[in-house]
Image (cartoon, rainbow, N blue to C red):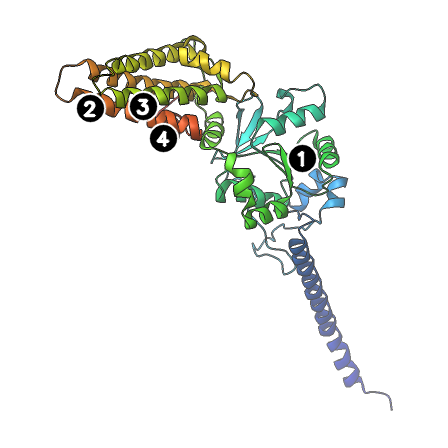
Amino acid sequence: MAPSNTMAGNIRELEPNQQEKRETRTEEQTAAKNEDKYHDIMEDGKMGVTRQSSEQRANETSDHDIEIGMEYDVSRQSSGRRPSNELPTRISLDDASNPKSERPDSVGATVRTTESAEESVIIDIDAYEGSTLGEKIEAIIASHSVVMFNRTWCLFSVDAIDFMVKQLNVPVHSVEIDVHPQGKEILKYVTQKTKHATTPFIFIRGEFLGGFSEVNALYAKGNLQKDYLKGLSQADQCETFISNSQYSMSTYFWFPDKVDATVVRITGSLTFFASVLAAVLVHFEEFFWAHYVAYVVAIDFFLRFLGGARISLFGRIAMILAFPFEPMPRMGKPKQFATCLGLLFSVLGSFAFLAPFPYNDYVGSAFMAGLAIATGLEGFLDFCIGCFIFRIGVKLGFFKGTS
């Protein structure tokens, strides 16, 4: 028997509802698949996920990016709510709330730094030595303690930089291969060099350690801290911070703009032993000459403050001893400031030894002991107290000027 017109009308009224339900189920299935892909990628650790908007992706994403990374559109709806099939977003280091400014770094290359001044994005690679792109990349790797070749949209790159800068407090120099004009050539060279196919590429002290997963695994075992980060001293971190500041790095008098860290450390060690002799032996009558050691230290600091190691006794000895080692350039300005503090302590100690007031030898010994502690930290641990104070002054805005 044929259905009545009323029944046929009811069936037609249900069809739109069923169609709407089918569309809803399709959207839910798509969202579930995207979420599964997201978790698979995060667990596998071999692919990156784009966090760019669809407009940025159309302008910036290269063919190679599509081969390596899986893209997701994270653009917001007009209502401000995230669509049901959209993956959670992360705040990028390029976010407007974390501005970057361009300035030259310690080797003269233009870098873009975050407000924390602990991540430097290298823009001008031509400032590094080398006639070919490969030689310049090798120079970048050799010039900085931690170098990372990364993509701005790659979650693993963002995590790696956050891990180094925020958790380990280690300064990072990075090259954004998806933004840099020579990004494709850089990626090709680094891939061939490391036999590693995904970003980031992490180098520590010139050695390639892998991507974020490999570095994180080394950290979990304790090998990263013990074997690789142990050599990244306070001086390295201070150097990076000050080089990225807006303070003028011009030195005074004839002090060099660049100094050799090895020469500085050897000079600090020699000053340490001389200061200990002056602080201790001055209390023994048979060592009547101990006062003169303090005077020699003060004069040596004065000469170093004027012209660096090249015109001082301890500096000349250090230059000879450091000759077999590879030079390690450091900025001269913080070292001249530290030398000024050493000059102050040595002059006060020498004056106390000369002045005829009660317990003058003990006062002089106290100044020379303080000088011995500071120079010993510099010589044996590469911890420059003067540079540390200089860094604090830059942070607090006590030192003005632009580079």
Q: Is residue 95 visible in the rendered structure shown here?
A: no
Q: Crowding near pointer 1: few (<14 within 10 Å), some, many (20+)?
A: some
The label number, if any, that marks residue 362 in the structure image: 2
Residue at the disc numbered 3: 276
Callout 3 touching callout 4 (CB < 8 Å) = no
**Earlier along the polypeptide chain: callout 3 or callout 1?**
1
Q: CA distance from mark 2 to mark 3?
A: 13 Å
Q: Crowding near pointer 2: few (<14 within 10 Å), some, many (20+)?
A: some
The nearer-to-camera label among 3 and 4 is 3
The label number, if any, that marks residue 396 in the structure image: 4
Q: Residue furthest front?
A: 286
In percent of width and height, residue 9 lies at: 77, 80
Callout 2 touching callout 4 (CB < 8 Å) = no
Callout 3 touching callout 1 (CB < 8 Å) = no
Q: Crowding near pointer 3: few (<14 within 10 Å), some, many (20+)?
A: many
The image quadrant of residue 17 is: bottom right
Callout 2 touching callout 3 (CB < 8 Å) = no
Q: Is residue 133 visible in the rendered structure shown here?
A: yes
The amino acid at mark 2 is: Tyr
Q: Secondary structure at mark 2?
A: helix
Report whether 56 appears left or right of 3: left
Q: Residue furthest left?
A: 358
Who is closer to the viewer here, 265 or 220?
A: 265
The label number, if any, that marks residue 177 in the structure image: 1
The amino acid at mark 1 is: Ile
**Earlier along the polypeptide chain: callout 1 or callout 4?**
1
**Earlier along the polypeptide chain: callout 2 or callout 4?**
2
The image quadrant of residue 295 is: top left
**Earlier along the polypeptide chain: callout 2 or callout 3?**
3
